[in-house]
Structure formats: C-alpha cells, structure tokens
Image (cartoon, rainbow, N blue to C red):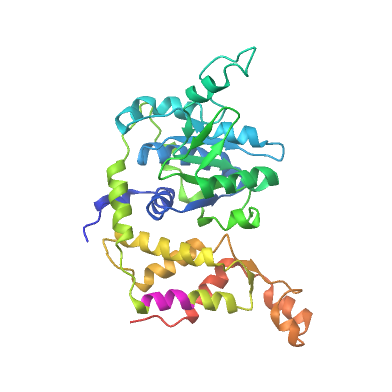
Amino acid sequence: MASIVDGRLQQLSDLDLAVLVSLASGQHCICSSPSHLGKDLRNELVLTCRETFGLQTAIINCSRKTTVDEFSEAILVESIDTFEDAEEGQDKANNHAGSPPRQNIRPSANPGKFSSLTNALDDRRIADVVIAMHLDVASESVQVQTLELLRTKRIFTRTAMHSAPRDFLLIVVASKRGARLSHHLNDMFGMSHFHGAEDGLPHLESREDVYSLPSFTRGELRTLQEQTVNVRLTGEVDAYLHNIVIFLRQSRYVNGGVTAAATRHLRAVAKALAPLHGLDYVPPSLVTLAAKKVYPHRLILATAETERTLRYGSDPDAIREVLRGITVEDVIEEVIAGVDTPL
C-alpha cells in the first residue's frame, strides 16, 4: 500500500502523530503534560490542528464553576461551507476559540416574538476540534453534556441545535498526569498521549506571523480514513489482540478499565496505524503499539485493599510491598511480554 503520508511522517512531532492517529481512527484523545506546560501544550495543539491539518479549533477552559451554557457556547464557531473558504476564516475562528462567539443578531426586547428568526439565523457549528482544558475538574453536569456531545455529535444552546462535523475530534488536556474523567465519559476516549518537556513544541518554537498551509489536506485525511477501513486483520493477529485484552483483565495488578469499548478502540487504533506505515494489514507490532496508546488512561490499578489474591488469604502487607511503585505502563509492558506473538 502506498502511504498517503509519504516522507512527511518522519517530519511530524509526537503531538502531530497523536492527532493524526486520532483523526485516522476516529477516536478522541486525552493529552497530559507536566503542570507547568499545560498552556504551552494547549497552544501547540491549536497550531498543530490549524497548520498541520487545516482544522478549525475551539478552546474551553474548564473549572468547577463552568456551566453547561458556557461549555456549549465556547465550542461553537462560525460555519464555513467549503475548505477553500476555511483559509480565509481560519484566523477568525481561532481568535474567538476561547470565548463565546458573538450572536448573529442583536438581542431583542421581546425575545419570544423573534425566537424563530433567531433559530434560523444562528447557523454556528461545533468546531472541527474542541480542546477542553482541565475537563476532568469540571462539574458532573458539564461532563454529562460532553458525553452527550460525543454520542450524538450535536449540542443544544438557547437559540438552536448545532451539529458537529463528520470528523469531529475532542482533545482533553488533563489537569495532571493520570487525571480521570467520569467513568462513562472516560470510556469514550480511544487514546491518550503524554507530552513531556523533552518532546519540544515545534509549532510554537518556529511560530511565524503568517498562516502556513496545512501539511495534510482534507482529501488526504479522507483517503487515509478510507485506507484504515480497508486494513486487514488476520485471524492470528486478531487472536493476539484478544489475548492481550484477556491477560490485562486477568492481571493481578488490574482492578478495572478493560472494557468492551476499550477493545473496539484497540482494534480501531491498530488499524489506523497500518496505512501510516504503508501497510494494508495489521502486524503484531502495531497491536502492541496501539495497546500503549489505548489503555494508559483506562486501567485502574489494584491496591492493597482490592488485590484479588486477598480473597485467598494473602498477607495485606506483602501485597502492599508487591504493588509498591507499579505503574500503568509497567502493567501494559508486562502483559505484552507475557502474550505469545504470532509468527
């Protein structure tokens, strides 16, 4: 299979690659970084989406006081009918990304009289990419609204119903590494990515005052998504993927998080990685790579109070010592090492 990305793959940053895999697989992503890099990570994501992929972005800075109405308004941008119009309106859309966009008509003293007119004129839409800062600390009502958005790809404001684009992507910048969303919302995110200080911020560091054309056109992204759908997964590799899931569920270090949705996301991400490597099939190595992206934000590690061998008389102090220092990454690596790889 000829790779759509050609030689550009080697030129992309880790964050570029994370967004590209998310777009190709149709999976939302949770990003995290050291606390002092949070704002830089947000700005780098905005430039990545705009300059590399030509996508409109909206930013919502969440806190415990963020309301559902504030969330809904912040993720909307002005509608752009065609990609050719996007370049002209791109800066405008991004400049308004962090604050509620202006209404299309002036508020009326008699809102009931003109409510139907307001609904007809408010044709804003949800941004291609919504970057939700610290969504993990937002109230339950905001997280429920987010869950509904991901399920239905639409949102209701006081003036209209607004739809998300076909390739809508939600990227959460977590308040800290290991932060979790509410249970059901967390399960909607197919990938996670940690951006360390050593990974750099290439878009910010080479920032120019003029808008640069994206490295990937919408057409190329569509082709990549079509190639992903047609990627083959042989019976042996599918069994290998299934065994990784089983071993994770049976691991003494895992107390939860290996859900059915996670298995679907693992398969989707593994398939999305194949065309990036010029392949039309999934080798075992891409399954293991996908597992390292799909499970870090999901796995719930056992504690000295929940470790399963306690049921059979294990000493709690000994269990506490065994679990000391174990990380999610350690568990994933151990499981992968313990599963027989097909030839």
- State the image quarter where residue 208 is shown: top left
| Residue 5 is one of the magenta-drawn residues | no
Q: Where is residue 174 in the image (x, y as percent from the top left)?
A: 60, 48
Looking at the image, residue 337 lies above or below residue 47: below
When the figure is inspected, residue 285 is found, relative to residue 2, above or below; the finding is below
Considering every residue shown, the one lying at the far left of the view is 2
Query: Image check: 270 left or right of 116?
Result: left
Give coordinates of residue 335: x percent, y percent.
Answer: 52, 76
Of 237 and 313, nearer the camera is 237
Q: Quadrant of the C terminus?
A: bottom left
Q: Residue at x 71, y 77 (%)?
A: 307
The range drawn in magenta is 237-243
Residue drawn at (63%, 32%) of the image:
70
> In x, y percent, where is residue 86?
35, 30
Whether residue 216 appears in this view of the structure is no
The image quadrant of residue 52 is: top left
Front residue of 68/174: it is 68
